[in-house]
Image (cartoon, rainbow, N blue to C red):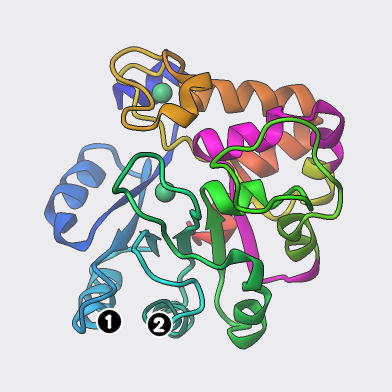
C-alpha cells in the first residue's frame, strides 16, 4: 500500500502463489475493493490443476504469473491454457529467452511460435508479459538480448498478434514493458492507439516507496536503466505522454477491469 500511494496507484492485481490465500484475504479485507488476486503454482507438478482450481474457487480471478522453465507450447503450459479457459479466468505468462544472470535459465520459451497457441486455445484469455513478449514488438528481435535498445522494426510478432487475436492481451509492467515503450518514441503513440483495448498497465516494481527507494531491479543488471527509479511511475509517465486521456484510462483502468472481471 505504501508503494501504491507513493506512485499514485489506487488498485492492483496481487500475483502470488496459491498458498498465500490467507494473506491475500487479509489484505482484501483490510482494503476492500482495492486488490484483485491472481494465483500461481508449480505447473511442472501434477497437482497444479487441482491447486489452481481451488484458488479460483477461493477467489482468485486469474492464473499467474506463470514463470517456469518450460516451453510456451509444451505440455505443462498447454494444460494451464486449457484450465484458464475452463475456469474462465485470464492467464498471465512470463516469456523470457535470455537469462538475466548466470544460472537463471529461461521461461516459457518459443514465443515466436506462439500464434499456434492462440489458435489452439481460442477461449483462453492470454496476458503476455516480460522480456520476450516485449522484445518481439520489433520484427528484428533474434533472442539476442533481454531488453533490445534502439529503433523498433515495424511489424513485430507481438504487435501483429495483439492486432490479430482477440484472446491476447499485453501486460505493460516491468522494465520489459517500459523499454518497449521508451526505445523508439516514434513508435509508441501509434502502438498504444492501435492496441488501446488490448494493453494493461502493471508495475511489477520492487522499489519500496513508489519513488524508487530501496532496492530496485535487484539481480537484473540488464535492467539498470530503471535502477533507483519506480517502474510504475516511469511507465505511467510514458503512457501519459503518448496517449489521449480516454486511451490512458483504458490502459490503466478499463482494460484491466474487463480482463479480470472486477
Ligand atoms: Zn514476470
Ligand atoms: Zn516502484
**Residues in magenta?**
164-190
Q: Answer yes or no: do the residues labelled 1 and 2 have beta carbons within 8 Å?
A: yes
Picture residue at 68% right of the left edge, 24% below the top: 238
Say whether residue 182 is magenta.
Answer: yes
For marks 1 and 2, give the CA distance.
7 Å
The quadrant in which the N terminus is found is top left
Pick the front one: 151 or 133: 151
Q: What element carries label 2?
A: helix
Identify residue for label 2: 83
- Would residue 9 be seen by someone viewing this image from the given angle? no
Q: Position of residue 229 (x, y in %)?
A: 46, 16
Decide which of tag 1 and tag 2 comes sooner along the chain.
1
Picture residue at 63% right of the left edge, 83% below the top: 122
Above or below, comparing residue 90 to residue 81 in the picture: above
- Would residue 37 be seen by someone viewing this image from the given angle? yes
Pick the front one: 231 or 55: 231
Q: Residue 49 carries which label?
A: 1
Query: Mark 1, residues whose alpha carbon is within 10 Å: few (<14), some, or many (≥20)?
Result: some
Side of 61 where 222 appears, left or right: right
Q: Position of residue 157 (x, y in %)?
A: 74, 60
Amino acid at each position: 500500500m505504501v508503494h501504491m500511494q507513493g506512485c499514485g496507484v489506487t488498485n492492483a492485481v496481487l500475483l502470488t502463489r496459491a498458498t498465500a490465500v490467507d494473506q491475500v484475504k487479509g489484505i482484501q479485507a483490510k482494503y476492500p475493493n482495492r486488490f484483485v488476486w491472481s494465483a500461481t503454482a508449480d505447473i511442472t507438478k501434477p497437482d497444479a490443476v487441482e491447486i489452481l482450481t481451488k484458488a479460483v474457487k477461493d477467489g482468485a480471478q486469474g492464473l499467474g504469473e506463470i514463470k517456469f522453465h518450460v516451453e510456451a507450447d509444451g505440455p505443462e503450459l498447454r494444460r494451464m491454457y486449457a484450465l484458464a479457459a475452463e475456469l474462465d479466468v485470464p492467464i498471465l505468462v512470463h516469456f523470457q529467452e535470455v537469462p538475466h544472470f548466470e544460472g537463471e535459465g529461461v521461461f516459457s520459451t518459443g514465443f515466436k511460435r506462439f500464434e499456434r497457441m492462440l489458435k489452439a486455445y481460442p477461449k483462453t484469455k492470454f496476458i503476455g508479459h516480460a522480456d520476450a513478449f516485449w522484445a518481439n514488438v520489433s520484427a528484428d528481435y533474434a533472442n539476442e538480448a533481454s531488453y533490445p535498445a534502439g529503433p523498433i522494426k515495424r511489424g513485430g510478432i507481438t504487435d501483429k498478434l495483439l492486432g490479430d487475436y482477440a484472446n491476447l492481451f499485453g501486460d505493460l509492467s516491468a522494465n520489459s514493458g517500459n523499454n518497449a515503450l521508451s526505445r523508439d518514441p516514434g513508435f509508441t503513440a501509434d502502438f498504444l492507439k492501435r492496441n488501446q483495448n488490448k494493453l494493461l498497465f502493471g508495475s511489477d516494481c520492487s522499489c519500496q516507496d513508489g519513488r524508487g527507494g530501496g532496492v530496485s531491479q535487484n539481480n537484473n543488471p540488464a535492467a539498470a536503466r530503471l535502477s533507483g527509479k519506480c517502474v510504475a511511475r516511469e511507465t505511467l509517465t510514458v503512457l501519459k505522454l503518448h496517449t489521449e486521456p480516454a486511451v490512458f484510462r483504458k490502459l490503466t483502468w478499463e482494460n484491466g477491469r474487463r480482463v479480470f472481471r472486477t
